[in-house]
Image (cartoon, rainbow, N blue to C red):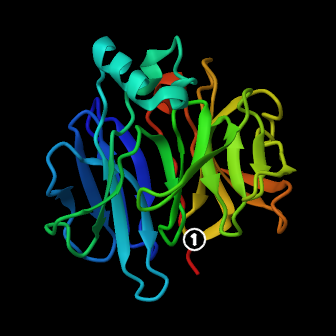
Amino acid sequence: GAKGARVENLCFTFDGQRVIYTRTDEKTAYAVAFDGLKNGKLSFKRPGFNYVLGLSRDAVTGEEYIYVGDRLEMTDAAFARTQEQLGGWTAGWGDRPEYARGGSSAVYRYSLKRLDAEPELVWDKMPVMNVVFSTDGKYMVAEMPWPRLVVATLPNGDMRQYELGCCPMLTPTGVLCRLGGEHQNIWMSTWEGAYYAHPHANTMPGLTGKRDIWRPKLAVNDGRFLVIKSYQEDSAGGNIYFGRFSADFRQIEGWVQITDSKGPDEAVNKEPAAWLKP
């Protein structure tokens, strides 16, 4: 990509024919097509809501939807007002108001076929960060705020905290996943909040136990597979790995290294995503 470009929230469409992402240096969403469709910038109807958050698909019609948010740049005064408005839900922010910045104040949903239509507002109860959506779009899991992970019913429905952590994921079987404090295990719990498993995730060949992991994502069309970024501030940098869960999601069976970074600077802008050819 262009020098200085910063890519966030890279997403494959469910058919694997397009990649959608945000360039944060431009505050603009892009689509790259593999099926002959036009590449380029995506234009959304609501100004400022240009940050791609995720995708969902209607199980009956197959129609795909894109979720977008804005990017909060709160002043200290605005942050204080938000704390007052949200009451106890801001306990996680406390003395770390920077965690209220960089999230989204609301979430809108567009059909990928009708980006020029008026979007549906699906969430504006409180700011969200690191959002993932269920495949059918009925639920989302997000940091509200970090480190509090919350499950919410869409649109604008009930919400409940299920754990503390970061980088949430949601398996097709309804297992809720998160990174623990050391960023070396994926902690899992059932939809009801009961402990499920915590497989070690820094088990790549030659790197076992040596590196933190970041940005885990399940493959968009097969939740047994995931991509993850290892990162360490040393001469080796970090890399993207492709792995597979066991059938019961209690361990990771193996890894394949995808990239070969030459140093830490090269690793910073890597954003993983995966789609499996059926």
- Mark 1 residue crowding within 10 angstroms, few (<14) / some (14–19) / many (20+): few
Report the label total.
1
x, y percent for residue 120: 28, 64
Q: Is residue 216 visible?
A: no
Q: Is residue 217 left or right of residue 5?
A: right
Q: In terms of secondary structure, where does tag 1 sit?
A: loop
Quadrant housing residue 206: top right
Q: Residue at x 53, y 66 (%)?
A: 275
Q: Is residue 248 left or right of residue 269?
A: right
x, y percent for residue 257: 66, 48
Callout 1 amino acid: Leu
Q: Residue at x 52, y 53 (%)?
A: 132
| Depicted 234 relative to depicted 278: above or below | above
x, y percent for residue 58: 44, 79
Q: Residue at x 53, y 69 (%)?
A: 135
Q: Is residue 47 visible?
A: yes
Residue located beneath label 1 in the image: 276
x, y percent for residue 141: 56, 51
Q: Is residue 261 left or right of residue 85?
A: right
